[in-house]
Image: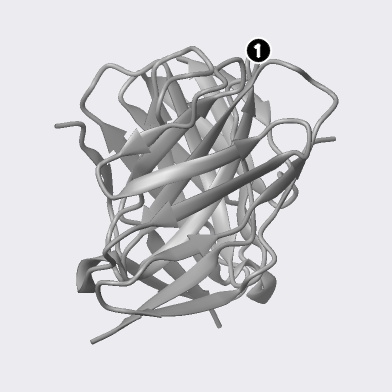
Amino acid sequence: AQTVTQSQPEMSVQEAETVTLSCTYDTSESDYYLFWYKQPPSRQMILVIRQEAYKQQNATENRFSVNFQKAAKSFSLKISDSQLGDAAMYFCAYRFWGAQKLVFGQGTRLTINP
Amino acid sequence: DVKVTQSSRYLVKRTGEKVFLECVQDMDHENMFWYRQDPGLGLRLIYFSYDVKMKEKGDIPEGYSVSREKKERFSLILESASTNQTSMYLCASSLQGAKNIQYFGAGTRLSVL
């Protein structure tokens, strides 16, 4: 069975600095998708970034980028120039290419210090 | 914008009550999902549906059932609520296809007393 592990229950960073959230996963499949979702306090979960496993290039969305290491089964999220609005729970998720369901990690609570 | 609406943000129920959680999406998505979110455990899939009247068990279906009579609506049913079902419940929807994004509702925080 596929599993996703986020080993940092909580992280904090000073505003305007860079922070990296870690995620590892376990799968025997070669074709899959990886996602980072953000859940702000009392608000809906939204997609931050998506990575296709067959792509070697790391995905980037504005201040958010990933470091995808397929052989190491690692998928970390880097947030540059952290802003107060980045404070949220962040979830890493995996989906096999032939499946509909997502497998989520435990989540990392990110605090931004002004 | 995709909208996934959950009927209640907060619910308080008694042990043994039958509880209905409702979810509606407005983007004609084939797939709909019910997750349970608990601290330290992340999100765990309860059930999902890939078409009207079609459903599949997720990772933790025990104590729950679902209903999908119309494409836009997916209901989660707790036949006899228990205190260990106190949790945050999240509904999501997506188009079919593994690369497609799941869109989430705001969640229902259920307390069973």
Please report the residue visible at 28 percent of the width from the left and 50 percent of the height from the top.
Answer: A63
Please, which colouring scheme is shown?
Answer: one colour
- Let me know if residue B14 appears in the view: no
Number of dots carrying numbers? 1
A70, B103: nearer the viewer = A70
Residue where numbered disc 1 is placed: A98
Q: Where is residue A67 in the image (x, y as percent from the top left)?
A: 55, 42
* Chain that bears disc 1: A
Question: Is B51 placed left or right of A8 in the picture?
Answer: left
Q: Where is residue A49 in the image (x, y as percent from the top left)?
A: 39, 38
Q: Residue furthest left?
A: B1
Please report the residue visible at 23 percent of the width from the left and 22 percent of the height from the top.
Answer: B27
Q: Position of residue B93 (x, y in %)?
A: 39, 30
- Let me know if residue A4 appears in the view: yes
From what the image shows, is residue A102 above or below residue A90? above
From what the image shows, is residue B82 above or below residue B55? below
Residue A47 falls in which quadrant of the image? top left
Please report the residue visible at 44 percent of the width from the left and 51 percent of the height from the top.
Answer: B90
Dividing the image into 4 quarters, which one contains the C terminus of chain A? bottom left
Q: Which amino acid does label 1 sit on?
A: Gly
A30, A70: nearer the viewer = A70
